[in-house]
Image (cartoon, rainbow, N blue to C red):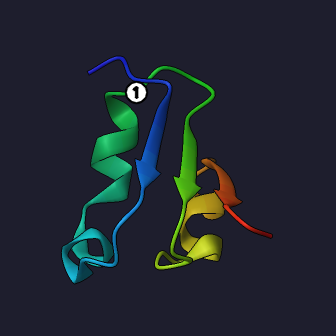
Amino acid sequence: NDAHAIAVLTEWDEFKNYDWAKIKEHMKKPAFVFDGRKLLNRKELEDLDFKYYAIGE
């Protein structure tokens, strides 16, 4: 709760199936996602108003 950011640093498929809308409800705004493996769906997260950054781009 109340995190500003999430960093995905592994390639575990379970991250793809998270309920990102529910997660965002419990985060401080703006909410950031740093995707170190380019694993997540950028458009989906940006549509939820996450500030998405693929690390290495």
- In the image, residue 9 lies at what x, y percent? 41, 60
**Identity of the residue furthest to the right in this view:** 57
The quarter of the displayed image where residue 30 is located: top right
- In the image, residue 32 lies at what x, y percent? 58, 40
18 vs 5, nearest the viewer: 5
Q: The residue under label 1 is which amino acid type?
A: Met
Which residue: 69% across, 56% down? 53
Few, some or many residues within 10 Å of mark 1 (<14, 14–19, 20+)? some
23 lies left or right of 47:
left
Which residue: 40% across, 40% down? 24
**As drawn, 23 above or below 45:** above
- In the image, residue 38 lies at what x, y percent? 56, 77
- In the image, residue 27 lies at what x, y percent? 40, 27
49 vs 51, nearest the viewer: 51
* Residue labelled with disc 1: 27
* Disc 1 element: loop
Which residue: 24% across, 77% down? 12
**As drawn, 51 above or below 20:** above
Q: Quadrant of the N terminus?
A: top left
Marks counted in the figure total: 1
Q: Quadrant of the C terminus?
A: bottom right
